[in-house]
Image (cartoon, rainbow, N blue to C red):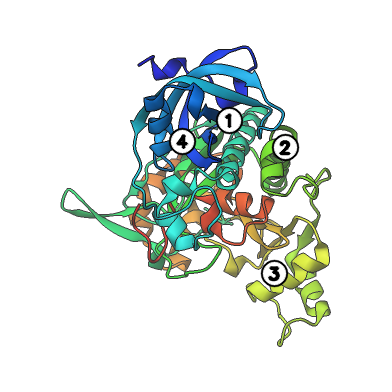
Amino acid sequence: MQGLDDRTYTADAEPGDHATIAGWVHEIRDLGGIAFLILRDTTGRIQVKFEKDEMDEELVETGLGVSRESVIAVTGDVDEEPRAPTGVEVTPDSLSVVAEADTELPLDPSGKVDAELPTRLDNRTLDLRKPEVKAIFEIRAEIFRAAREAFREANATEITTPKIVATGTEGGTELFPITYFGEEAFMNQSPQLFKQLTAGSGLERVFEIGPIFRAEEHNTPRHLNEATSIDFEGAFCDHEDAMDVCESVVLAAYEAVEENCSEQLETLGLAADFEAPTDSFPRLTYEEAIERINATGKLDEQLVWGDDLPTEGEHALGQDVGEHYFVTDWPSEIKPFYIKDHDDDETLSTGFDLMHPRMELVSGGQREHRHDRLIAGFEQQGLDPDEFEYYTKMFKYGMPPHAGWAIGAERLVMTLLDLDNIREAVIFPRDRQRLSP
Ligand code: AMO
């Protein structure tokens, strides 16, 4: 057999070519004297024509006898054929079955038969043969590419930090414990402490795109137990600077999808409605946010200062604002200990969230970089500062003011593409029920 690497993609096959095309058998339509096999690869589909009386009997038998979703390679002349789905067709002079598929498939990749999400996730390989599923992950990859470019423009260096750690930062109940050479360790919930330690290094501005692990019991359409976090941390940044970088990354992601993924948006039926935000996002204080939520009259009970924003409150405000928005100046007590309070009002935190009208996308803030205040923060949080000495001691050796944030990548994809369930934005999601594949 000719090397499979020499194959021509279906999208590149031009009339006049003598080409080898390899891919999956999407469909076979046998009309009697003539039959068509639709062959699918990553670029699309092509029609393969079998004229039974004029072609080698064995070739016809093999081609038309092969089961759907088998992998085959065909070699033949490519001709113009206006009636074919892509305007061209191949008449094979040879055909080989590369990998045969069972005749019973757990899922129909042609999309003619719908499958429930759990069945799709159990059989993700087959599911991802559907153009509308593949499009989501092509867009996700484009978002990552655009984010990396935006970070580089913001002078940030890409880093990776450990995922096996000795301590957690985002609340003790959400840690996954593991055994590390006989000692207790955890899967990291956030690169928080490491990115701060690196911002205080000669790198100054850093970013990471990597997994975070949250052992939360939530089984909701917007929570995962393993998510992808897009993190930023910058030395000599305050919370306003951090919000500027955050805005530029989110805007870059939308712009890149609009510019470079028109085919995928078309496949997903979103091309007509997709609109990248062009302007900066409004920045509401927490106080304004609760006033506006209360004014919508959509909550049974009015929110008061100090309340976290309940999900219904976020929805009401999201509808009211109608676009991405930041919430700033939170009460200090409901933001993590590592976030700095305002210098002129210690009841107010420099922490911020970026909200999509549907849900929270980002948390961030300026960090407490003063050693004594940081130690006090740990103690107030009920955490033992000694356990975090590897982190706190670096605040004694010249730690500049710094700020940062984290975007939940799957939530960004989910909101950008208006997906109902966050699991649609991960190839192999980890949730309360799912540990494989
Ligand atoms: P936080 O815990 O708010 O902040 O997480 C940041 C963002 O990550 C996403 N996210 C999740 N997505 C899916 N499933 C989950 N279980 C999940 N948990 C979080 C959300 C969220 O807004 N260290 C801080 C960030 C910082 O201050 O730099 C942190 O982790 O989109």
Q: Residue at x 46, y 56 (%)?
A: 120
Residue hosting label 2: 262
Question: 437 and 168: which one is in front?
Answer: 437
Do the numbered discs 3 and 2 sit on residues whose CB atoms are within 8 Å?
no
Residue type indicated by callout 3:
Glu
> Which amino acid, by three-letter code, is at mark 2?
Ser
In the image, what residue type sits under mark 1?
Ile
Q: Tell which tag, 2 or 1, sits nearer the viewer.
A: 1
Question: Which quadrant of the figure shows ligand 1?
Answer: bottom right
Counting residues from the start of the chain, the first of labels 3 and 1 encountered is 1
Q: Residues within 10 Å of mark 4 (few under 14, many from 20)?
A: many
Give above or below for 372 relative to 6.
Answer: below
**Dot 3 beta carbon under 8 Å from ligand 1:** no
Quarter of the rendering occupied by the N terminus = top left
Find disc 3 in the rendering and name its residue: 314
* Label 4 secondary element: strand
Which residue in the structure is indicated by mark 4?
Answer: 24
The residue identified by callout 1 is: 46
Label 4 – label 1 distance at C-alpha: 11 Å
| Between marks 3 and 1 in the image, the one whose residue lies nearer the viewer | 1
Residue 260 point in image, percent of width and height: 70, 32
From the viewer's perspective, tell me whether residue 243 is left or right of residue 123. Answer: right
Residue located 47% across and 59% down the image: 224
Calculate the distance from the C-alpha at mark 3 to the C-alpha at mark 4. Answer: 45 Å
Q: Is residue 436 visible?
A: yes
Earlier in the chain: of badge 2 and badge 1, it is 1
**Secondary element at tag 1:** strand
